[in-house]
Image (cartoon, rainbow, N blue to C red):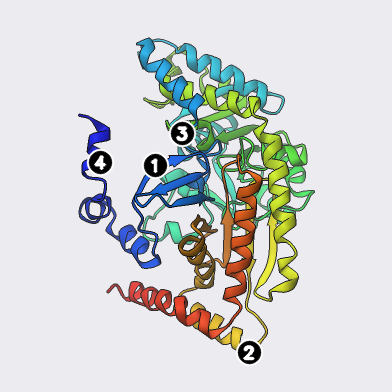
Amino acid sequence: MKIQELLQQRGKENFSLHDRYLNSQMVRVLKTIGFDRHYVRADGAYLFDDKDNRYLDLLSGFGVFALGRNHPEIVEALKDVLEAEAPNLVQLDVSLLAGVLAEKLVKLTPPGLNRVFFANSGTETIEAAIKFSRYATGKSKIIFCRGCYHGLSLGSLSATGDDHYKKGFGPLVPDFIEIPFNDLAALEEALAQNDVAAFITEPIQGHGVWIPDDDYLPGAAALARKYGALFIADEVQTGLGRTGKWWAVEHWSVEPDIICMAKALSGGFVPVGALVCKEWIFDKVFNRMDRAVVHGSTFGKNNLAMAAGLATLEVMESENLIEHAAQAGKTILDQLQPMVDEYECLSEVRGLGMMIALEFTEPKSLSLKLSWKMLEAANKGLFSQMITVPLFRRHRILSQVAGHGMNIVKFIPPLILTESDIEWLVGAVRNVVADAHRGPIAVWDLGKTLATQAMRFKVGT
């Protein structure tokens, strides 16, 4: 089968095929908001459709494409693996490439983390972290934070603090305790019985881009140690340079017991996740020869994934992408921040590195207030679509709402944005936010359509 021929011959069937064989509701959503494009090419921070229009990708596959799309060095590394005809997934063997990638990750993570487990995704690393914590400590309870997102498999879903994803999938895994994010008193109260295996948190909550107080993560790590629980840092999205450091916990000088990572480690090609933890945890879980395979992942150490991981780390270092993410992110924040004083619906611009949020709130002026209330009555968080949809339709910028029912727009762009990309982004945001403040006309041009569709979705028509 010639894949390029297939893409050319059936390139415009993607929506009909998904409508018939996959998730038809996703097709409805994309068509409703006007995101139903036929992309034919991708390069760096850009997507190109069948009319050769260029789009700036500020979604980056939910953070997967930290290096941009189709980075030539990752492509070359994967070609090398295929041409080498090396043995792969022998299983009753140990992989050289997995060993080399593990060695590299241990050097890059905080001190004391020196054992690595490879999986295929972020949610698999969270599942492993939960299991390892329970076995290593002999305790069962896992504390997680309200508003967090750790994945959609059953264990990671049990640790996810958003009921939108949980409804109808219960009963979930027992002994999971939810507490507020950024609340040390609540954490200590939950830990006080000394029966908790681990506290898991995103250093910065991805759904909303909520950044904790400076004392929160150091205090949480200290409390976990005090009560004999492990501290798990979910760096699936925040890690590997996203926030301007290798790991977000480095901003607060925190040394977790376990770090989970994925997304960017793939280079945008081959799914890969990794858990890096303290040696004693690993030695507890894999404590005898007959337990050597007590936890694993069939495809977790495949050669293509390991090569993609190695090439990704090399590119990040050789192109100084961590430093670039910090500088470019600061530039974006500095240029967007003044808009908070100019537009009453925009309440906050926040972020760290290339993880940025624009939060919108109900305005005070009467005309805008009525427009806001109309949208919110149709569907909570609908105003944020008044930003993301025009960004896409008018300015060809792909972005996302930061979470279900939130009036927060989130940017997680590739770490490679140029000065002209930043100008494109800032100019487009200013134009769209200004339009959204023109009151009822702006709402009825776009908001009426979105509100009508939202009401239809509610009643299932």
Q: What element carries label 1?
A: strand
- Residue extending farthest front: 52
Q: Which of 44 and 295 is in front in this view?
A: 44
- Of badges 3 and 4, the one in the foreground is 4
Does residue 389 appear in the picture of this structure?
A: yes
**What's the amino acid at mark 3?**
Asn
On-image quarter of the N terminus? top left
Residue 233: which numbered mark, if any? Answer: none
Question: Vertically, is 140 above or below 159?
Answer: above
Question: Vertically, is 270 above or below 445?
Answer: above
Q: Where is residue 139 in the image (x, y as percent from the top left)?
A: 57, 37
Q: Residues within 10 Å of mark 1 (few under 14, many from 20)?
A: some
The reply to whether discs 3 and 2 touch (Cβ–Cβ < 8 Å) is no
According to the picture, the residue beneath numbered tag 4 turns out to be: 8
- Of badges 1 and 3, the one in the foreground is 1
- Residue extending farthest bottom: 366
Residue 41: which numbered mark, if any? Answer: 1
Q: Is mark 3 on a helix, strand or loop?
A: loop
Residue 70: which numbered mark, if any? Answer: 3
Q: Distance between the residues labelled 4 and 1?
A: 12 Å
N-terminal-most mark, 4 or 2: 4
On-image quarter of the C terminus? bottom left
N-terminal-most mark, 3 or 4: 4
**What's the amino acid at mark 1?**
Arg
